[in-house]
Image (cartoon, rainbow, N blue to C red):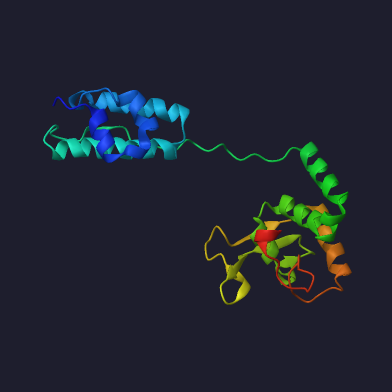
Amino acid sequence: DSTNIAACYRLSFEAHFRLVLPALGELRVREATVPVVDAFLTALQLKKGTATVKTARTVVSGVLGYAVRQGALDTNPIRETTRIEGRRKKSPRSLTREERVQWLARLESDEKAVRWDLPDLSRFMLATGVRIGEALAVYWSEVDLDEGLVEVDHNVVRVKGKGLIRKSTKTQYGERTLPLPSWAVDMLRQRHTLAGEPSDGPVFPDSLGGLRDPSNM
């Protein structure tokens, strides 16, 4: 009961002084009540990330667990503290019209971006909202230019020993048929004509006509 937290802390978690000691190091073991420890973790989360707070919680739990094993405490108060939740992520937002225009203009003016076929790929992704791996997995057989529709039910992934493959999304959410705005239909129709009206194959192929790797696009 007379042993302070700093002494126990040094025995078990020498490497984490800076996280816990300034706030709790001078407390007696029995002064580390649930409200005290909870207030410390809450204050720490306002300054640090969730991962850091969880590390601090683990450190304090180890210290107080050691105190329980030595008979200085009956129970570990860390178990009754508030659950640590990650901060809510910011909601995604769409690009504004001005941002879209600026983005496409910059791509069109960049020789390397044009050579890598990035402007049309960006337009397709803006038109559909699909992920890059899904966009690269779309085959011409899944595009209906007359109806202005595209089927999205595959993703491009790299498999060890096989290379790039089209993998089915396998989920009801992943498999969907999306309407295309008229400007996207015009873009795809032009690509189809320039490609020699292919019967099938990727809409956005690599230089050899095969699948492109999403990780280096």
Quarter of the figure that contains the C terminus: bottom right
On the image, the x and y values in percent for residue 114 come to 85, 57
For residue 78, say whether it is visible.
no
On the image, the x and y values in percent for residue 37 come to 29, 27
Figure check: 61 above or below 182: above
Q: Quadrant of residue 212?
A: bottom right
Image position of 208 (left or right of 111): left
Image position of 128 (left or right of 185): left
Q: Which of these two is toward me, 93 or 13?
A: 13
For residue 116, say whether it is visible.
yes
On the image, the x and y values in percent for residue 138 come to 69, 66
Determine the residue positioned at 79% across, 56% down. 118
Q: Which of these two is toward me, 118 or 185?
A: 118
Figure check: 26 above or below 65: above
Image position of 195 (left or right of 161): right
Figure check: 63 above or below 139: above
Q: Quadrant of residue 10?
A: top left
The number of discs equals 0
Determine the residue positioned at 84% across, 56% down. 112
Quarter of the figure that contains the N terminus: top left
Determine the residue positioned at 35% across, 30% down. 20
Determine the residue positioned at 56% across, 73% down. 160
On the image, the x and y values in percent for residue 48 come to 46, 32
Q: Which of these two is toward me, 87 or 180?
A: 87
